[in-house]
Amino acid sequence: MFEARRKVLPKAVKGPFRRFKWAVMVLTLLIYYATPWLRWDRGAWAPDQAVLVDLAHRRFYFFSIEIWPHEFYYVAGLLVMAAIGLFLVTSAVGRAWCGYACPQTVWTDLFQHVERLVEGDRNAQLRLLAAPWGPNKLARRATKHAIWIMIAVLTGGAWIFYFADAPTLARQIAEGTAPLVAYTTVAILAAATYVLGGLMREQVCQFMCPWPRIQTAMMDERSLTITYKFWRGEPRTRGLKRSKAAETHPVELLQTGDCIDCNACVAVCPTGIDIREGPQIGCITCGLCIDACDDVMIRVGREPKLIAYATELDARAEQAGEAPVPPLRRLLRARTLVYFTVWCAIGVGMLVMLEGRTRLELSVLQARNPLWVRLSDGTIRNTYQIRIRNLEARPREVELTMSGVAGTMWPESVDRKDAGRSVRFRVDADKVAKERLFVAAPEAGPQRSDIRFTIRALDGEGESASTANAFERPEAGR
Ligand code: SF4
Ligand code: SF4
């Protein structure tokens, strides 16, 4: 029922796409490993790690932006943007994400590079695979797996630094005093990296990842993909047969295609597929077969780009001897424009919201049991639970005022003789101040009056927030 897995041992290749892959790999790994170590001064009241998911205090820090749990919609917005960005890239340039920047691709590429360093290139690896177990095979395999495990542990280790102060956690890990959850997380992530990047490799892309299936619905005849120009390459003929045919049957030579069936494109493919069989779900469009084939074509004195990035439309045009669609017309089409517009709209909307958000928030909840109390002086008292949220990384003095009811107010912690029309609070940095507040007003008046509470920062910035509530009096005659 099942075909046994053919071990994919890709051959090393040189060329522009390989160089681009190296550049993306270095950049993405650098970002991943270095980001937790970047510092960002937020003053004495907040952590100085530039990117930090502070689960203990339920905060997300990203350079100058601080996200509270109730602002999670910003994170959701970023995730939506990332998804639409991926749709946009896929529609415009095909599976560029899979071929260059996906973590599975980057780590698999890294692991395969280690494999080539330790065991040699493809042919040496095949020989080692077929060789019986002995000291050489044992030593090479042990070295390879040891390096893989080291990379896997470093990968898992880097991840946890996003969730705690990196230097402190690193010191705790070195001293063996880090929390158990840190070691457990590193162990789980290291195991996942080792298994997915080292052992399963291309199988993750081909059988586990849903993205290739989703992307096929996003691509159309103007999306870039890897194309084997069969009209140029076929009928393929091996080099020896070709030269023999040329000696005896010159006409036959004219009927052969450019592909010399050297298998170089298959040998370098990290997913082990033969692109000459047409577009396949296993092709991550990394372009390495283009590098390999171009090298062969140049060496045999033929025109390169027998395998190339091309859209279906371009392929058809080239086959018919027509000019390809200009790149701009290919990029600017309804699908990409819709994705781009939605992506920009969400991004601009979030920026506007971020810029306009207040860093001071007020919520007031009226105590319902009892709704009112008649005091000894005949006034009616209502009770409110107020919460003042200071989203700044510094303590703030704020003034609470009320309007709509002609009365006085005072916090529970203060004597009534100090009651007035305003109350001052100090709210610690990045904290929520909670207080029970009493409001007393003459009994004469409507049974239910609108009352509005307003807070204003006293630090000169004039930031304010307000909320409406109700003041209740007894029914007439009670
Ligand atoms: S067929 Fe070519 S582009 Fe596709 S995965 Fe293999 S090497 Fe990369
Ligand atoms: S590398 Fe080029 S010439 Fe060689 S088999 Fe592949 S397509 Fe044919």
Image (cartoon, grey):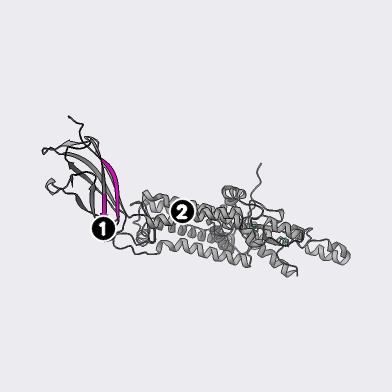
Residue 456 belongs to the span the image colors magenta? yes
Q: Residue at x 33, y 52 (%)?
A: 57
Q: Which segment did they paint magenta? A: 454-471
Front-lying residue, 278 or 13:
278
Assess whether mark 2 and mark 1 are in contact (beta carbons under 8 angstroms). Answer: no
Mark 1 and mark 2: Cα distance apart in space:
29 Å
Left or right? Give the position of 387 relative to 350: left
Which quarter of the figure is the C terminus placed in? top left
Q: Main secondary structure of the magenta part?
A: strand
Which label's residue is closer to the chain start, 1 or 2? 2
Q: Position of residue 388 (x, y in %)?
A: 27, 50
Which quarter of the figure is the N terminus placed in? top right
Q: Position of residue 465 (x, y in %)?
A: 30, 51
Q: Position of residue 430 (x, y in %)?
A: 30, 55
Left or right? Give the position of 267 relative to 46: right
- Residue type, numbered disc 1: Pro
Residue 113 belongs to the span the image colors magenta? no
Q: Which residue is mark 1?
A: 395
Of all residues shown, which one is farthest toward the front? Answer: 445
Q: Is mark 1 within 8 Å of ligand 1?
A: no
Front-lying residue, 444 or 56:
444
Q: Is mark 2 within 8 Å of ligand 1?
A: no
Q: Position of residue 339 (x, y in %)?
A: 55, 53
Q: Residue at x 45, y 50 (%)?
A: 76
Front-lying residue, 251 or 2:
251
User: Dot 1: what SS?
Assistant: loop
User: Dot 2: what SS?
Assistant: helix
- Residue type, numbered disc 2: Leu
Q: Badge 1: how crowded within 10 Å, few (<14), some, or many (20+)?
A: some
Q: Which residue is mark 2?
A: 78
Left or right? Give the position of 41 relative to 91: left
